[in-house]
Image (spheres, grey):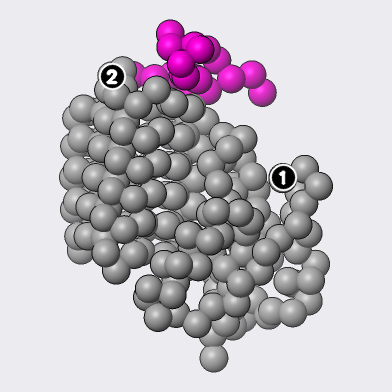
Amino acid sequence: MTNFVLMGVGEALECACRVADDLGMVCVRLELSSADNYNFQLDGFFASFASSDTQVFVALDERAVNYSRHKLIAQVRLAGYRLFNLVSPKAIVENGVLLKGNVYVGAGCNISDKSILGVGCWLDRQVTIDRSVRLGSCVTLLSGVTLGRGVVVGKGTTLSTGSFALAGTKIGHHCEWLLGGQLPKVIPDQSFYDRLMPDGARILK
């Protein structure tokens, strides 16, 4: 018998649990603790669940440019655990779409053929993705994001509510676009845009 474990914190974990319930999945909920929201304690999980019969979904929000989610997923995978996806029964995902693991697809999303969603991607409600879009690992698309045909989004990037990218747009890795509206045709790696910095800034490592 396979154990399905939902691990994480906050609203992301609540959302994941709701979709699992909608799918009729029987899952173990594991709320994690951390002093810095980056280093999570997994010793109890490793001691309680064998990797041979356990699949995991990591539910963390988009802050810190998604590094926390990426790190936790990597820890779980390196320990030998398999990941599973959570796709709302109220979403439309065409047959030719590739979900690479630990992908969350919320209610009302519509994902077209030949698109690829990397490990750990999080799509909130009502996200629309046209054909042949590629999302890197741990990309977060908040509610109402629309991506045109052939858009490429680099790993760890967050696009805010109401954002839209025209066909062929290229967005770098570890970017944050928090303005809504139309994205530029090209956004360099580690770029940050919000109301205080609408012309953009670079995220320093």
Q: Residues within 10 Å of mark 2 (few under 14, many from 20)?
A: few
Quick check: 179 left or right of 128?
Answer: right
Q: Where 27 sits versus 182, above or below? A: below
Magenta-colored stretch includes residue 90: no
Residue sticking out furthest to the bottom: 1
Res 198 seen here = yes
Q: What range is drawn magenta here?
A: 186-205
Give the overall secondary structure of the magenta segment. loop
| Disc with the residue nearer the chain's start (1 vs 2) | 1
Name the residue that disc number 1 marks.
38
Residue 189: x percent and y percent?
48, 23
Q: Nearer the viewer, mark 1 or mark 2?
A: 1
Q: Amino acid at mark 1?
A: Tyr
- Numbered label tally: 2
Name the residue that disc number 2 marks.
185
| The one of 108 and 101 positioned closer to us in this rendering | 108
Q: Amino acid at mark 2?
A: Lys
Q: On the rendered image, what quadrant is the C terminus found in?
A: top right
Residue 190: x percent and y percent?
52, 23
| The one of 110 and 72 positioned closer to us in this rendering | 110
The quadrant where residue 9 appears:
bottom right
Q: CA distance from mark 1 to mark 2?
A: 32 Å
Task: Name the element at disc 1.
Answer: loop
Res 93 seen here = no
